[in-house]
Image: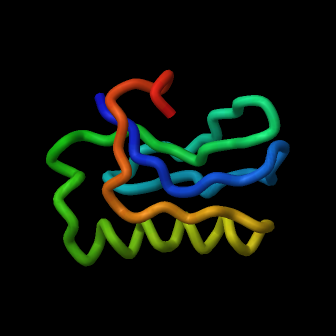
């Protein structure tokens, strides 16, 4: 499984949206004072189409409404959580 990164923010951040691209749960990964908001991703869900891009944008906008973030472009993917 790969991991799609939505945005970066300061830790501790508020709750994240429940579902992301492909219906995968969205969750924060924390390292020192930062969080990366991520979800699991199947390779077939990486191909951008309108519903996937809208879901991605909604997760980013929801996080932004909760506080300052650094948004990432759709398609920022790593193969392992440790690479985030």
Residue, x 25% and y 77% (percent of image)?
50
Residue 67 occupies quadrant: bottom right
| Residue 56, placed above or below residue 26 | below
Screen quadrant of the N terminus: top left
Residue, x 57% and y 52% (percent of image)?
18
The one of 70 and 20 positioned closer to us in this rendering = 70
| Residue 65, placed above or below residue 59 | below
- Residue 30 image point, x, y percent: 70, 33
Residue, x 51% and y 72% (percent of image)?
58
Q: How many labels does the image show?
A: 0
| Residue 45, placed above or below residue 74 | above
Residue 70 occupies quadrant: bottom right
The one of 84 and 66 positioned closer to us in this rendering = 84
Residue 56 occupies quadrant: bottom left
In the picture, measured across the screen, residue 55 lies left or right of residue 79, that is right
- Residue 71 image point, x, y percent: 56, 65
In the picture, measured across the screen, residue 45 lies left or right of residue 73, that is left
Figure colour scheme:
rainbow
Residue, x 57% and y 56% (percent of image)?
7
In the picture, measured across the screen, residue 82 lies left or right of residue 27, that is left
The one of 82 and 66 positioned closer to us in this rendering = 82
- Residue 39 image point, x, y percent: 46, 43
């Amino acid at each position: 499984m790969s991991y799609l990164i939505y945005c970066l923010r300061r830790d501790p951040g508020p709750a994240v949206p429940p579902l992301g691209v492909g219906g995968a749960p969205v969750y924060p990964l924390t390292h020192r004072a930062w969080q990366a908001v991520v979800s699991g991703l199947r390779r077939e869900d990486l191909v951008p189409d309108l519903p996937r891009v809208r879901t991605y944008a909604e997760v980013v906008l929801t996080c932004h409404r909760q506080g300052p973030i650094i948004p990432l472009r759709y398609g920022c993917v790593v193969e392992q959580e440790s690479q985030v």
